[in-house]
Amino acid sequence: DQQVKQNSPSLSVQEGRISILNCDYTNSMFDYFLWYKKYPAEGPTFLISISSIKDKNEDGRFTVFLNKSAKHLSLHIVPSQPGDSAVYFCAALTNFGNEKLTFGTGTRLTIIP
Amino acid sequence: KAGVTQTPRYLIKTRGQQVTLSCSPISGHRSVSWYQQTPGQGLQFLFEYFSETQRNKGNFPGRFSGRQFSNSRSEMNVSTLELGDSALYLCASSSGTSQEAFFGQGTRLTVV
């Protein structure tokens, strides 16, 4: 049972345009969400996170939106750069102090120069 | 500050053997989690240790076990290896006061 789903295995975006990566979840107990970026042969790198009490969090070119009623979150990257090409994972936590991350299966983002 | 260190980076084992992987968390971090990544499965949670105690466990068979030492370093052991255990094993550390987990580069295990 995949509690965190990333339904797009891949996405291609022109350099300079906006990249939008989507993530859906089924467990209403999730209350903290994170996005990780992963290059081949490296561990995931933390990008940005959002608490369930917020609907938006912004950090530079990265913005995460959370729609709790739809159990949906998205990561926006503006403007997209070639170095953003990687696999992006969304992850969720059920409660503070519980470090068990539930990951989606990832979306491979390719930025086209 | 040094990041999360996993050793070895690559490992080839034969079916039926056992393997031990090591993870040194970021200094001061007390929580260490282990994940398995296989193609198409994303990252699957194995277990989490906090202050030498297993605090959380995923849905993996008992062949997968772990432990944490007083210096927060952690080891993961897989006994009676199967071909399907071939994967990238990732360790993540966190402070326990912040939700962000920081990952090591992983150990690529190949079972032949």
Image (tube, coloured by chain):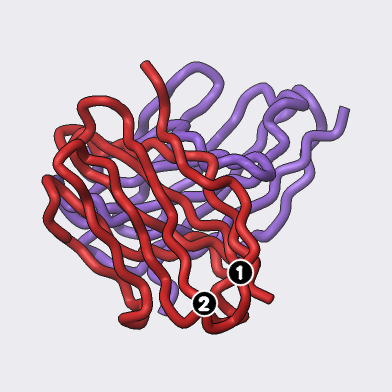
Chain colours: A purple, B red
- Establish whether labels 1 and 2 are both on one chain: yes
Residue at (78% x, 44% y) in the render: A12
Residue closest to the eye, A20 or B76:
B76
Residue A55 shows in this picture:
no
Dot 1 and dot 2 residues touching (CB under 8 Å): yes
Residue B98 screen position, x and y as percent: 21, 33
Q: In the orientation shown, which residue stands out farthest toward the right?
A: A113
Q: Which amino acid does label 2 sit on?
A: Gln
Question: Looking at the image, is B47 positioned above or below residue B104?
Answer: below
Crowding near the residue tagged with mark 1, few <14, some 14–19, many ≥20 C-alpha atoms within 10 Å: some
Residue at (29% x, 49% y) in the render: B74
Residue A73 screen position, x and y as percent: 43, 49
Residue closest to the eye, B76 or B59:
B76
Q: Name the residue under label 2.
A: B17
Mark 1 element type: strand
- The image quarter containing residue A101 is bottom left
Quarter holding the C terminus of chain A?
Answer: top right
Subunit of label 1? B
Q: Which amino acid does label 1 sit on?
A: Lys
- The image quarter containing residue A78 is top right
Subunit of label 2? B
Q: Mark 1 points at which residue?
A: B13
Residue A108 screen position, x and y as percent: 69, 50
